């Protein structure tokens, strides 16, 4: 690996800060509606995928495959989370890449869980299980977790430790699960003093047929983002379009995720640069789910250590592209890191 081809070594800090990723956990069960539960599960929801993206960016910059200084924080419900099943799956996905996994357990609550299957036309379908997004699930589980005290314990000593980079997934719609309480810890003054760089990935759901996000959802999301004053915001294209249509934008720097069309680095709503997507090693993606989460966390991590916006977006684009080449989170090995480096150089070549 030749780091200098990806980013100038002069841009790198002498010490790398810890990255704390606060994200959602959703259990994916793969079975038809008439099948009984099996052990075929995956831990999704965006949180683990974000943690991998942050770790991959640090591994590239630090030229190391050791577990990276990344802490993943996610909430799980004790009614259905089993350490020997769901916990083991999460550890298998993340432990080689990150130093710390911190689970916030909700008593008498369910971990959000969805059932995935293909219909008779081979279209992927899903449906929630239990009370996954109701009062016994995400509506309560995601509210006020983590607390300010939870976060401060993970952020380390304010005297001897560097300010942390923080990446959060934010439920952003008008009827967001958790009633907008999923990142309330960021309103705490002591928490903000410990954060040296804050990135937010807002999650909203456009109309399935038109792909257009409602003005109400865009306005609700804008208000949440504006109140939190993040250093970087990474919306998807439907949210960005809906916000700019109402002349709304929040965040000093933003990067708009646009799937196979790449991304756009924006400032105050104006597009500063278009970042092409990296070429894949196959004709079609294996699984695009989670790639946007990995992209957003990688972008925040790079920006947080001082890499310029365009270079940061190129690295993030590469990590997102490599992510879609695997069924789930990519394995943590030298081959994957070399593939990320190759994809980064591919993106930079396309920009010339």
Image (tube, rainbow, N blue to C red):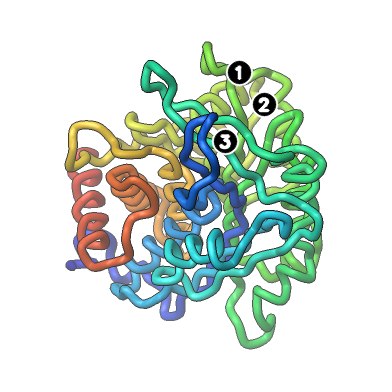
**Disc 2 designates what residue?**
218
Residue at point 45% right, 44% down? 290
Quadrant of the image occupied by residue 186: bottom right
Q: Is residue 275 rendered to the left or right of residue 351? A: right
> Is disc 3 surrounded by few (<14), some (14 to 19) or many (20+) residues within 10 Å?
some
Q: Distance between the residues labelled 3 and 1?
A: 13 Å
Look at the numbered disc 2 and give the secondary structure of its residue.
helix
Q: Which residue appears farthest toward the top when viewing the image?
A: 210
Residue at point 33% right, 29% down? 261
Q: Residue 228: where, in percent of width, then height?
A: 72, 48
Quadrant of the image occupied by residue 158: bottom right
Among numbered discs 3 and 1, the one appearing first in the sequence: 1
Q: In this view, does 272 lie above or below 84?
A: above
**Disc 3 designates what residue?**
268
Q: Residue 19: where, in percent of width, then height?
A: 53, 67
Among numbered discs 1 and 2, the one appearing first in the sequence: 2
Q: Is residue 197 visible?
A: no
Marks 1 and 2 close (CB-CB < 8 Å): yes
**Disc 1 designates what residue?**
245
> Is disc 1 surrounded by few (<14), some (14 to 19) or many (20+) residues within 10 Å?
few
Look at the numbered disc 1 and give the secondary structure of its residue.
helix
Q: Is residue 147 above or below residue 309?
A: below
In-front residue for pair 331/114: 114
Q: How far apart are marks 2 and 3 (CA)?
A: 16 Å
The C terminus appears in which quarter of the rendering? top left
Among numbered discs 2 and 3, the one appearing first in the sequence: 2
Q: In this view, does 80 lie above or below 234?
A: below
């Amino acid at each position: 690996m030749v780091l200098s081809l990806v980013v100038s070594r002069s841009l790198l800090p002498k010490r790398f800060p810890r990255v704390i990723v606060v994200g959602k956990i959703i259990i994916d069960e793969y079975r038809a509606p008439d099948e009984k539960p099996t052990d075929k599960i995956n831990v999704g929801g965006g949180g683990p995928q974000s943690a991998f993206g942050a770790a991959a960016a640090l591994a590239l910059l630090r030229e190391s495959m050791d577990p990276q200084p990344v802490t993943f924080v996610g909430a799980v419900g004790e009614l259905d989370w089993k350490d020997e099943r769901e916990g083991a799956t999460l550890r298998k996905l993340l432990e080689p890449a990150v130093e710390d996994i911190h689970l916030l357990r909700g008593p008498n609550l369910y971990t959000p869980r969805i059932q995935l299957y293909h219909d008779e036309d081979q279209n992927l379908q899903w449906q929630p299980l239990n009370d996954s997004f109701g009062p016994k699930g995400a509506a309560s589980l995601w509210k006020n977790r983590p607390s300010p005290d939870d976060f401060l314990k993970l952020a380390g000593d304010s005297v001897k430790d560097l300010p942390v980079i923080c990446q959060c997934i934010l439920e952003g719609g008008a009827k967001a699960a958790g009633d907008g309480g999923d990142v309330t810890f960021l309103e705490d003054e002591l928490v903000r003093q410990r954060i040296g760089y804050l990135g937010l990935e807002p999650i909203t759901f456009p109309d399935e047929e038109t792909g257009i996000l409602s003005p109400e959802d865009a306005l609700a999301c804008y208000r949440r983002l504006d109140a939190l004053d993040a250093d970087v915001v990474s919306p998807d294209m439907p949210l960005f379009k809906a916000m700019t249509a109402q002349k709304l934008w929040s965040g000093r720097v933003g990067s708009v995720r646009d799937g196979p069309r790449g991304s756009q680095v924006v400032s105050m709503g104006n597009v500063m640069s278009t970042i092409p997507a990296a070429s894949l090693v196959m004709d079609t993606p294996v699984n695009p789910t989670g790639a946007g989460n990995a992209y957003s966390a990688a972008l925040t991590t790079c920006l947080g250590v001082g890499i310029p916006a365009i270079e940061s977006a190129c690295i993030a684009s590469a990590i997102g592209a490599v992510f879609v080449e695997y069924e789930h989170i990519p394995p943590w090995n030298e081959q994957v890191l070399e593939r990320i480096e190759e994809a980064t150089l591919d993106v930079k070549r396309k920009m010339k």
